[in-house]
Amino acid sequence: MKKINILFAASECTPFIKTGGLADVAGALPSYVNTANYEIRVVIPKYSALPKKYTDKMEYMCNFYVPLGWRNQYCGLFKLKIGKVTYYFLDNEYYFKRDNLYGEFDDGERFAFFSKAVCEAILHMDFEPDILHCNDWHTALAPVFLREFYRDAEKTRDIKTIFTIHNIKFQGMFSSFLLGDILGLWGTPAAWQLLSDSHTVNYMLGALCYSDRITTVSPGYAEEICSWYYGEGLEYILNKRKSILSGILNGIDTKVYDPEKDKALAVNYGASSLEKKKENKLALQRETGLEVSEEVPMFALISRLTEQKGLDLVTYILPHISERNMQLVVLGVGDQKYEEAFAYYAGRYPGKICFLKKFDEAQSHRIYAASDAFLMPSRFEPCGLSQMMAMRYASLPIVRETGGLKDSVAPYNKYTGEGTGFSFANFNAHELLGAVDEALTLWFNDKEAWTHLMHNAAEADFSWKSSAKEYRELYKHLIQG
Ligand code: ADP
C-alpha cells in the first residue's frame, strides 16, 4: 500500500497551546495514527504565546505571501519534530501576536488568513499531503479555498479534504462584507453556499459544502446534529450530506490519566487494587474541609461552568443534595450565576459541599481519584472527556444520554448488574435527581454491585488506539475509494 500523507490543520494543539478538547485531539491523534503506511503532520498558527522552549527549537523553512482579498499578507513557515510527529507553524505577527487565541475583533480575518495560509503553505512544504484534515470553524475555509484557488497547482490539485466538527455551536459567523474583502470569493459559485443569509458568512457551512468527508467526535453526536434540536441551523446541509458524515469517539491519554502511576494522587491504585481508592477520598476530605469519613459517598463535578454542561440541573437540585447523606466537590470556573450558586451552598453546608473556583489540573486528578460518582448531565456533549477520565479512576459517571456521553457510558442494569455508570434521558432536574438517588441506593445497599461497576469502569478501553484505527480506515477509504 502506498503511504498516505495527511496534513492536520487546527487552531490549537497540545503540548504547544490549549484552550479545550480540540488541542487534546490534535496533540494525541497523530502519534497514534503514524505508522508505516500513514503519516499525519500538524499545522497550527505560530501564536506569540507558544512556550519559548518550543519556539527556540523550531527550524525556519521559508516565507511566502498569502493573497487575502485585495491584500497580500506575509507568512513564515517553521517546523519542529517531536517524537513521531512533525509540526508546522505559520507565522504572521499581525494576526497571531495577540493576548488571546480567540475573541479578538478580527477573528474572521485572522482565521481566514490561517486557512488560506495552510493551502499556500502546502506549495512550500517538504511534504506532499494526500489529505487535508481540517478541524472546527478556524480551518473551515481551507477546503473551500483549496477547491476555488488551488485546483490548478499540481501539488494541491488532487488533495482530498476532511472536516471534523468538535462543537457545532461555534460556526464562525461574520459579516458578509468579508466574503469579497477578505475571502476574495465574491462572484464565485462558492459565495452563495457560504452565505447563511444576506448579512452573514458562515465558515463552517463552507466546509460542510466543500469537504469530501465530514466527521464529528462521537457517533451519537453525528446522529444528533442532523436534528433541529442539536443542529444549530446546519441540520439541513448535514442531512443532505449524511452519506459522508460519520462519528469517531475521541480517546484520552491513558498515560497521563493512570491511577496506578499518577503522581498527583495521595495513594495510587488500579483495577486490581480498588480498595486503596478510599485513601484518596479521606485525603481530599482533609484537604478541602469536608467531613472526614469513608462512610459517606462523594460526588464530583469538574467542568467549565457553562450552560452546555447541564449546570442548571445541578444547581436546581443543590437543596436536595444538601438534604442527602452525600458529599459534593465542584471544581470549575465559568458563568457567574453558577459560581454564585455553588459558592452559596458550599458556604451554607461546609462539611458536605465544597466549591473550588479555579482551573487546577493536579487537583482535578485528585478529585477523579477521590470521588465515588461523577456528575455530567450535559445539555449536549460532542464527545466529552471528563466522563472517560472519571471511569478510568473508577468514579462512576452520572450522565445525560446525549452525544459522546451516551456512546461511552453503559448505564447500570439492575437485572444483569452490568454497566459503567448511571444515566437519564431528558434534560430535566428531577431525572438527574432520580439518577443520583439510584446511585446512592446502590452505594449504600449493595457494595458488591457497586464494586463490580467500578471494575467495569476502570477496565473500559478509552485509549486512542481504537479511535486511531478508525481514522486510518477513514483515510484509506477516502484515498482508495
Ligand atoms: P470540554 O472540552 O467541553 O470542556 P471535556 O469533558 O471534553 O469538556 O474536557 C474537559 C477537560 O477539562 C477535562 O480534562 C477536565 O478534567 C478538564 N477541566 C475542566 N475544568 C477544569 C478545572 N476547573 N480544573 C482542571 N481541569 C478542568
Image (cartoon, rainbow, N blue to C red):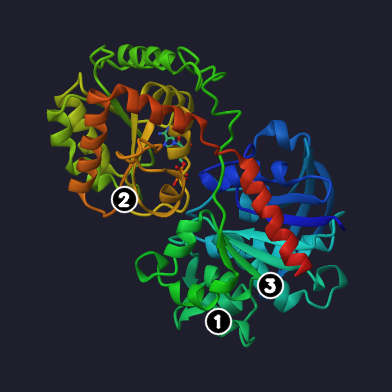
Who's the residue at 23% across and 24% down the image? 444
Q: Is residue 398 above or below residue 186?
A: above
Q: Is residue 80 visible?
A: yes
- Mark before the other along the chain sequence, 3 or 2: 3
Q: Provide the residue designation for mark 2.
A: 307
Residue 43, given in percent of the width and then of the height, sits at 71, 52
161 relative to 329 in the view: left or right: right
Q: Is residue 385 above or below residue 53?
A: below
> Disc 1 on helix, strand or loop?
helix
Who's the residue at 86% across and 57% down the image? 1
Labelled disc at residue 145: 3
Residue 346, given in percent of the width and then of the height, sits at 21, 27
Find residue 446 and report its image quarter.
Answer: top left
Residue 470, given in percent of the width and then of the height, sits at 65, 53
Residue 366 vs residue 401, the one in the foreground:
401
Q: Provide the residue designation for mark 1.
A: 193
- Mark before the other along the chain sequence, 2 or 1: 1
Q: Is residue 30 above or below residue 325?
A: below
> Disc 3 on helix, strand or loop?
helix
| Amino acid type, mark 2 | Glu
